[in-house]
Image (spheres, rainbow, N blue to C red):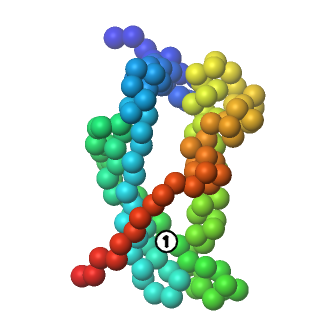
Amino acid sequence: MSQATIKNDVNLDDLMTAIEAVKEDSANGKLTFTVHSKWENGFKARHTTGGFKVGKDTGNRNQDHSLSTDEPLEILGGDAGISPAETLISSLGACLTVGYAANAAAMGIDLEELHNYVNEHSPIWDTICNPVSISSEIVAG
């Protein structure tokens, strides 16, 4: 069994396989995520990961992940969690970080060389700049 090629802690073999799958059928690059949000009190809520899909395939997590949001005291919250605005900014930062690691690895370069390229190809940057339609519903129970 051959050893994987690693650059910037990214498995290049797996990355190239994913890139080729998207080149063959762009639907393979479609990602769908679900998050369940539960209001707790005041401005506090708990958000837990749900299912996700990569292309037509359902993804599997080893465990659910969650975070609490709230507003700072100065904005009438209890400061019991990260604010929704900070969550959005953190999502952008996380997406850019992943973009840096993946693109630098694919290009065979170190992370410092990619700032503008990553901004131009970030899905979250694109979502913020070109909003997508979303829906929500209240489930009583």
Q: Residue 63's x, y, as percent? A: 33, 53
Q: Is residue 86 above or below residue 96?
A: below
Q: Residue at x 67, y 85 (%)?
A: 75
Q: Amino acid at mark 1?
A: Ser
The one of 112 and 130 positioned closer to us in this rendering = 130
Give the class, few, some or many, for how many residues have Cα within 10 Å of label 1's Cα (few <14, many ≥20): some
Q: Which residue is mark 1?
A: 68
Left or right, 32 with respect to 120, comes to left
Q: Residue at x 56, y 77 (%)?
A: 70
Left or right, 70 with respect to 67, comes to right
Task: Indicate the secondary structure of the residue bearing disc 1.
Answer: strand
Q: Residue at x 57, y 30 (%)?
A: 102
* Residue 140 visible here: yes
Q: Residue at x 58, y 70 (%)?
A: 84
Residue 71 figure quarter? bottom right
The one of 137 and 107 positioned closer to us in this rendering = 137
The one of 89 and 110 positioned closer to us in this rendering = 89
Q: Residue 43's x, y, as percent? A: 53, 83
